[in-house]
Amino acid sequence: MPAWGWVLIAVAAAAVLALVVWQALARRRTARLQQQFGPEYERTLRSTESKRQAEAQLQAREARRQQLEIRPLTQAARDRYLDSWQAVQAQFVDNPRAAVAAADSLIGNVMVERGYPVEDFDQQADDVSVDHPQVVEHYRQGHRLAQASADGDDSTENLRQAMRHYRALFDELVEPSADEPLARGQNDDVADQPRTRARGRMMR
């Protein structure tokens, strides 16, 4: 076989090897992002034109999150916010709209104290999704319903759902284990009192 034939074979083999390596790395990246973001991975995939674009967005979120100095709440701050949330829940009985607005503001305050930028809601949600992918959609839905209320929607059921959604994120943000990279799960109903030991004070 002439020398150029061997060269072609070597080039083809190198190309095949490069393709195999690239595919393996792509599968590995996909698996990691799916594990990290959970339902947020599927949501991002649905909202973009391609898997590559979705994964690039998620990686960009991770890169931005690494630049943020997210810090845990002190015990005193945690207790203060738990007391404030209890007051917000009590307010819901008499004034649901005001309670939802207060819940929205309270969550913003928690996020600021923990170090999350709050200048833009969509960016807020993206930042939170890296640490709390299981509950970030609650935040979006709660915000949407709160905005509808501010625009004149007085549906008590929608306001109750907004509180439910907000509480899911609130619980994650104030927990001592909120500093873990992945959120643990979702709560069921705004009428239920918080269940973990750090939220026990709200049950009094």
Image (tube, rainbow, N blue to C red):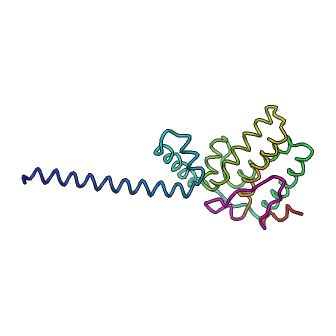
Q: Position of residue 49 (x, y in %)?
A: 49, 38
Residue interval drawn in magenta: 176-197
Q: Foreground: 77 or 52?
A: 52
**Residue furthest out toward the right:** 94
Furthest toward the top, the residue is 152
Q: Is residue 159 magenta?
A: no
Q: Quadrant of residue 197?
A: bottom right
Q: Position of residue 176 (x, y in %)?
A: 71, 64
Q: Is residue 189 magenta?
A: yes
The residue at the point 26 percent across, 51 percent down is 15
- In the image, 65: left or right of 108? left
From the viewer's side, name the closer residue of 91 and 115.
91
Question: Is the residue 58 above or below the residue 194 in the image?
Answer: above
* Residue 94: image location, x then y, percent: 93, 44
Q: How many dots with numbers? A: 0
Magenta: main secondary structure equals loop
Quarter of the picture containing the C terminus is bottom right
Relative image position of residue 8 (x, y in whole percent) = 16, 50
Residue 131 vs 119, above or below: the answer is below
